[in-house]
Amino acid sequence: MSKITSLTDAIHEYVHDGDSVALEGFTHLIPYAAGHEIMRQGRRDLALVRMTPDLIYDQMIGMGCARKLTFSWGGNPGVGSLHRFRDAVEKRWPHPLEIDERSHASMAAAYTAGAAGLPMGILRGFVGSDLPKYNPNIRFVECPFTGEKLAATPAINPDVSIIHAQKADRKGNVLLWGIVGVQKEAVLSAKRCIVTVEEIVDTLNAPPNACVLPSWVVDAVCEVPGGAFPSYSDGYYDRDNAVYIEWDSISKDRDAFSEWMKFHVMETNNFEEFRERLES
């Protein structure tokens, strides 16, 4: 049975209200198109997970999709704050947002533990940090071999992980390269997985150090050219820095944000239409 489907159908089938959802991508291959489709379909009460939430999570939080965010850093890269994220935390708009803040190393360890079927990740970290005072999900254990005090963090096992990649073949095997981040671990730790890709090809010719995800860990593959815009896709297009800069002023005001989202996302049928409106 083919895993290739439309993004609309994939989100409808695999993303449900109340799910924990990870849209991963580290500066590169960020699944913007999938995030937009989640908003179009009106998903609510999501527990969002991501190592570095940026614009797409700012949009999803501002549109009322999220009840919780597990993360290690949040911001508009190279520009400043995420204003919709801050508004939700500081002023509870559009509704309160629970946060589970960790560190980069802690998130990576938690995804790796989830992928390995372990209950927690272990790391040397948080020494001198105040985070353990405020986050009960950061605890400490003693190494049974050396007696060393180590930090422990619960495994991350999303209901669904979504990533963007460069290519997939017609059997559903996925190829990605460049800055990969924790995409592989996010896929392997999840119950369900959706991958959007730049193109579907007959044969995957993997370059050195590329990552190939076998079809058996993927539930749906959706061909969405440009689906990581405005982030970049190595070998296909560059990062559009202007979009990140413009987002700062758009997102500062609730009404300006709501109107922008209505026109560019909610009143469009797909990511291609979003791009057309943005560029018109």
Image: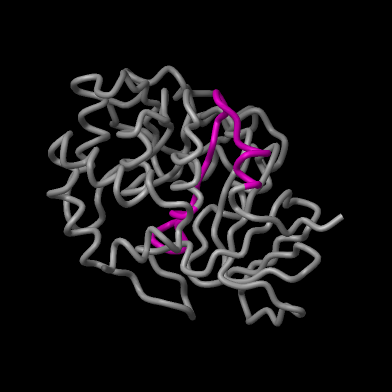
Which residue is drawn at the image coordinates 41% and 51% (left, top)? 268
Image quadrant holding the C terminus, namely bottom left
- Residue 145 in magenta? no
Q: Where is residue 18 in the image (x, y as percent from the top left)?
A: 55, 23
Q: Left or right? Give the position of 168 relative to 164.
A: right
Q: Left or right? Give the position of 109 relative to 40.
A: right
Hey, which quadrant is residue 118 in on the image? top right
Q: Where is residue 39 in the image (x, y as percent from the top left)?
A: 44, 39
Q: Is residue 141 above or below residue 242?
A: above
Q: Is residue 66 above or below residue 256?
A: above
**Of the pair 127 and 91, the residue shown nearer to us:** 91
Residue 150 makes an appearance in the image: no
Q: In this view, does 121 lie above or below 179?
A: above
Residue 89 makes an appearance in the image: yes
Which residue is drawn at the image coordinates 77% and 60% (left, top)? 214
Q: Left or right? Give the position of 123 relative to 84.
A: right
Magenta range:
9-33
**Of the pair 129 and 279, the residue shown nearer to us:** 279
